Image: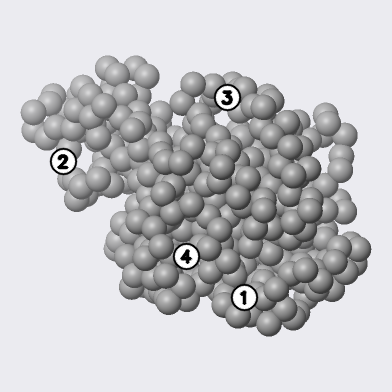
Amino acid sequence: MLKFTADQIFTVSAEPLNRAVVITDDTGKILAIESLDQHDPTSVAYVPGALIPGFVNTHCHLELSHMKGKVDTGTGLIPFITGVVTKRNAVQEEIQDAIQRAEQEMLDGGIVALGDISNAPDTFAVKSRGRMRYHTFLEMFDFLQEANAEKTFSDGLKVFEQLNHAPGSTATLVPHAPYSVSKNLFQKINAFNPGTGITVSIHNQETPPEQELFLEKKGGFLDFYGKFGISLDAFESTGQPSIYYALAHMNPAVRTLFVHNTLTTQQDIMAAQAWSDQVYWATCPNANLYIENRLPDYSAFLNTGARLTIGTDSLTSNWQLSVLEEMKTIARYQSYVPFDTLLRWATLNGAQALGFDDTLGSIEPGKTPGLLQLQGLAGGRLNAKATIHRLI
Ligand SMILES: [Zn+2]
């Protein structure tokens, strides 16, 4: 049995506690939360700073870890994607080594669960060890080519069938983004996944050309597709922002995680939340700065009661894989977001979004959420030098 106390304890499921003790068994399962007065102080480990549950990272591409530093910052999404497509090949040994190091970086940084996009089976060996809970989003795209949906789907299914997750981890098939998935492919993905009780994700409203494609069939994606010899002759613009195309073709009965949302307006958020009561949003602020040099407007999400979660995206589009660094970025640029709100995004909301809140996301008896020491909270704000130390 282990006992911890700290200057403040953020359980996330309830108000912060002072003079409290968190009692766990040797595996980290929370047995009880009690008043410090009930315990002999010499039997309790004092942790300077705050005690918080482990982080849940809802969006990453672990399989792109070997591309750290290879694609330029600040160029916008289309040059970024072109860079990924043309530079992602590497020898398997290098890919595996980078994936293992990336997983270790996340474990050391207090991440206990990951929502991870896979196009290939490269991460499956690391995931099978079960060092954290994984939800694998096996991602598909057919570049809006209805005729290619069948082959794209069957190729993706062959990768999906190679998954060998440890107990507690899960997986679904998911569409990549509105600008890359045909109606036909959306239908096949929906038909394959269970109709309820699961999570799917989609990249959403990340760059102005994505909006231009759907609003007016104009902009950078026409050139992008042309360069790869892909015809958009059969594609018809919808006259609405890209998220409405996703809403028209995804299943409102399952949890849906919209990722990035840098251009998403309050009206778009309300439309999505009217479409389904199981909508979650993943924000990856450092990746947004890396790729597009812009951030979402978090006030639109706060005003609409949206359930935000935090993702790191991949090492191809980030300087590190740290949920704490994502929180610091939000605290630096949009400091009106309160710390306890940020913490909820980074823990319980993420656990709920991935369906992992049975064991993770908050310090509550019966859960095994991981326990982190957070130092660097000053006056209720996260300062730039804040650090995490993983206790369990
Ligand atoms: Zn992504």
Q: On the image, which quarter does residue 160 sit in?
A: top right
Which residue is at the front of the view, 312 or 215? 215
| Element at label 1 | loop
Q: Is the Cβ of the residue at disc 1 closer than 8 Å to that at disc 4?
A: no
N-term-proximal mark, 2 vs 3? 2
N-term-proximal mark, 1 vs 4? 1
Q: Which residue is denoted by mark 2 in the rendering?
A: 19
Q: Is the Cβ of the residue at disc 1 closer than 8 Å to that at disc 3?
A: no
| Element at label 4 | helix
Task: Bin the neighbour count of mark 4 within 10 Å (Cα to Cα): few under 14, some 14-19, many 20 and up.
Answer: many
Q: Which residue is denoted by mark 1 in the rendering?
A: 238
N-term-proximal mark, 1 vs 2? 2
Ligand 1 neighbours mark 4 (CB distance < 8 Å): no
Q: Which residue is denoted by mark 4 in the rendering?
A: 330
Residue 165, numbered label: 3
The quadrant of the rendering that contains the N terminus is top left
